[in-house]
Image (spheres, helix red, strand yellow):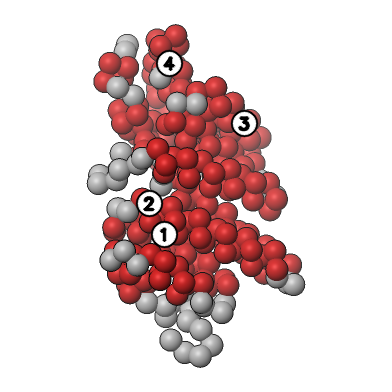
Amino acid sequence: MNQEGTSLNEMDLVSLLALVQTGKLADAIAVVKANPNPMEASAAFIELSKQTYRDLKDVSSMVALGNAGTQFAVSKAASSENSADAEKLRKYAKVLAFNTAANCWPGWGDIGIDIKTEHLQAGLKLAELCRDLTVELKLGHQELGTAHWLIGALDLAMGHYADSLAELQCAKEEFRAGGNSDQVLLADGYAALALKAQQESRLAGAHELDRILLLLGNQNSKEAQFFANQLITADRVLLPASLSDVG
């Protein structure tokens, strides 16, 4: 580490990950924050959080890094006298908030990942921060649609079905305004899952999900196939077998 601080390329992420793995999370956070370059520190938070999820499968530490990193970037942005730097830092915060919140979504079915209620709650707060930063940064329809989708997905996993459907409707409207038909279908598919999860709308939701999967299959695009597989996995992971087997 030189006197002017460590760049992201030079920062020993292996050592930082080892600190996290050995229970020295606070030390890892302190080392990242000590970098005098807030851009590099923010980028390091993003990478360390990603590796903590992917390599350690430690959701709690990932959430702690996500919270610390977003707070750091937002705070540095607020105190920056350079508007361009402030915008970049808010973008770093937005990316970290999204990534962390997305990894709190249990519907991916990732092996070795155990999502608890507190992770969902933390993920929802970060997803809302992501949405707010997306609006503030004026990132456009697709980014805003994705932010609303993530909130809706987390609400779905928490059993907040009315909230989920409202957020997914917002996502659908943003995706439609952005001209992405595959993502419109994705939002509709998640709404179908929210319907299928409820006793009173189980059959309607199951039929709607089948319809959406058929439409995605007819799109003949890699994105549509990815979305279809995502919905199939979420259906299997989130909903009891008795619901997933409804025809």
Disc 1 from disc 2: Cα separation: 10 Å
Q: Secondary structure at mark 4?
A: loop
* Mark 2 or 4: the one toward you: 2
Q: Is residue 20 left or right of residue 66?
A: left
Please state which of residues 214 and 41 is positioned toward the viewer in this rendering.
41
Q: Which residue is mark 4?
A: 198
Q: Residue at x 64, y 63 (%)?
A: 75
Give, as a three-letter code, the residue at label 3. Answer: Cys
Q: Residue at x 41, y 47 (%)?
A: 103
Q: Secondary structure at mark 3?
A: helix
Q: Earlier in the sequence, mark 1 or mark 2?
A: 1
Q: Is residue 177 left or right of residue 18?
A: right
Which labelled disc corresponds to residue 60? 2
Q: Are there few (<14), some (14-19), or many (20+) residues within 10 Å of tag 2?
A: some
Q: Residue at x 32, y 17 (%)?
A: 243
Instruction: Please state the horizontal and vertical placement of residue 164, each as a whole percent of the image.
Output: 53, 28
Which labelled disc corresponds to residue 194? none
Q: Which residue is mark 1?
A: 49
70 is higher (above) or lower (below) than 193? below
Q: Which residue is mark 3?
A: 170
Give, as a three-letter code, the residue at label 4. Answer: Gln
Q: Secondary structure at mark 1?
A: helix
Give, as a three-letter code, the residue at label 1. Answer: Ser
Q: Are marks 3 and 2 in contact (CB under 8 Å)?
A: no
Q: Earlier in the sequence, mark 3 or mark 2?
A: 2
Q: Quadrant of the N terminus?
A: bottom left
Give, as a three-letter code, the residue at label 2. Answer: Ser
Q: Quadrant of the C terminus?
A: top left
